[in-house]
Amino acid sequence: MILDLHTHSDASEDSRAPVESYLKWLVRKRPLLPIDGIVLTEHRQWNPHADYRALEDKYGLLILRGAEVETDYGHVLVYGVNDAITRRFDFTNVRLPAAELIPAVSALGGIAAPCHPGRPTIGLCAHYEDKPPLEGIVAVEALNGGSRRGENERVQQLIADHGYGAFGGSDSHLVSFIGICATEFECAVRTIEDLVSALQGGGYRPIDFRERLRSEA
Amino acid sequence: MSDVDTPAWEDLDVGHELSPLRLTLSAAQVRQYAEAAHMPGARFFSDDAARKEGLPGQIAPGNLSLALFSRLIVTALPGATLTRLGATFRVPVRPGQPLVVRGVITEKHCTDHGDLFECDLVIESVEGDRWVTGTASARAPAPR
Amino acid sequence: MAITIDRSVVGSEFDRTTHPPVAQTEVDAYAAASGESCPADGVAPPTFVVSLRSHRFMPKSLARLGRAGLDAGKDIELGAPIRVGDVLTTVSTVHDIYEKTGRSGPMGFLVLRTVVTNQRDEGVAVIDQRMMFR
């Protein structure tokens, strides 16, 4: 099962992509992009009322939701967001304490995973240069579709040094970038609880579709 | 990506890639644009002035990137009327650097007043680094 | 932090300018410089609207930011085309303020909205400009 774990719809201030447009694009591009679903990870926000079941039914694709938050160790993707987590952490705070966030999210039923760790300033690699490593990290986004040359490569040493799991996501802010990087799971993922369990348990890898897309262009 | 000829309006659909623009802005062109657009910032006129502001050198105004997107749409979709244009300036565009302006149709809405197309737009280096991203909506001429 | 997030200014109007009639020389100079073509004789290219210069570019209460900002992006809704001779009015408000962190560190964002109308009170454009401050 292949999911894009890092996407932004027009609910994020810097994205121009309606959710339905993402799904239409994936249906059209299915021969090249065999994506089974996406996880919407909007910047610094969580809408408990958003409901995409009608779109899931219409397009036959899974839509899960998480969030991308900002911490003192860079940006972090949070999956399994619930009321307890949002009561504890204000997602609009751009300086959330990562050392507190990561174990607390886990204890409250979710998982917090650093994204684009190779990126300057907002990636984990930069912070590990002069700060102690964080406890409780299970996986990091090893493949990010919006990263610049060298940034994804920088993550490999981080993963080797700390034994982190590795996943992928497009970090798409435009319709045509959805699914360019994703994560392949050995198990089925049907709910956000399944995703949290899968990321904690292992049996997944990042997958890069960019070369395939370029060669077909 | 290969350049493609523009098909008839009715044949345009989601996934169609617009014929890209390939160009290199000169320092003089950037200055000319800044003057015509009433943008007096020194960063648009000289490398030294731009470096004093912490920039790597002379930069092109973001508005010039918008103009490049507009050119792409009008060139690739002759007769279309731009109704919406947006851009995020991720990295300053600098004169002397070859760049590629690309677009792809992501939505098509068929109406009696002319089909409305949504496009994703990118200005990138020849190596594929994205400097500017954006979207546009353009309306085809109404059917006769 | 580059700017203090004072959301009390959101929604406030900080400029209202009626511009001199659009001149053919201006349109020609912009078209030549931008590489855009004019849709018809006497009609300005689509992005000409961003060349309008209002009396005040920034709210007075945020004037200390001066020219320290970088243009982070724009979103433009286009309406009636701009024609030579049009007298355009721009009304600018503070649309949003927020902060985020990026590659270059903590950043403040100011979103300024400008509504452009012509002498017939037709909507010409709505421009949202995002300014980034470190």
Image (tube, rainbow, N blue to C red):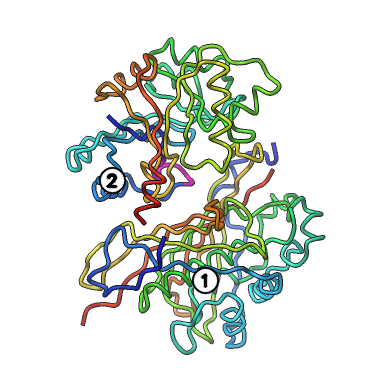
The residue located at (53%, 41%) in the rendering is A147
The x and y percentages for residue B45 are: 75, 67
Does residue A2 appear in this view? Answer: yes
The quadrant holding residue A210 is: top left
Front one among A31 and B114: A31
Does residue C66 appear in this view? Answer: no
Q: Whole-Å distance between the Cαs marked 1 and 2?
A: 32 Å
The x and y percentages for residue A143 are: 47, 34
Most extreme residue toward the top, as rendered? A107
The residue located at (74%, 53%) in the rendering is B56
The x and y percentages for residue B138 are: 36, 68
Q: C66 above or below C20?
A: above
Q: C6 above or below B61?
A: above
Total numbered circles: 2
Would you name the residue on which mark 2 appears?
A: A26
Residue B123 left/right relative to A26: right
Q: Main secondary structure of the magenta part?
A: loop
Give the number of the mark in front: 1 or 2.
2
Front one among B52 and C52: B52
**Chain letter for mark 1:** C
The quadrant holding residue C52 is: bottom right
Would you name the residue on which mark 1 appears?
A: C47
Q: C63 above or below A113?
A: below
Assign a secondary structure to mark 1. helix
Asked if the stretch drawn in magenta spans residue A182, the answer is: no
The x and y percentages for residue C39 are: 44, 82
Residue C17 left/right relative to A64: right
Q: Residues within 10 Å of mark 2 (few under 14, many from 20)?
A: many
Where, quadrant-wise, is the N terminus of chain A in this rendering? Answer: top left
Point out the stretch of residues depicted in magenta: A8-14
Front one among A40 and C90: A40
Amino acid at the residue labelled 1? Thr
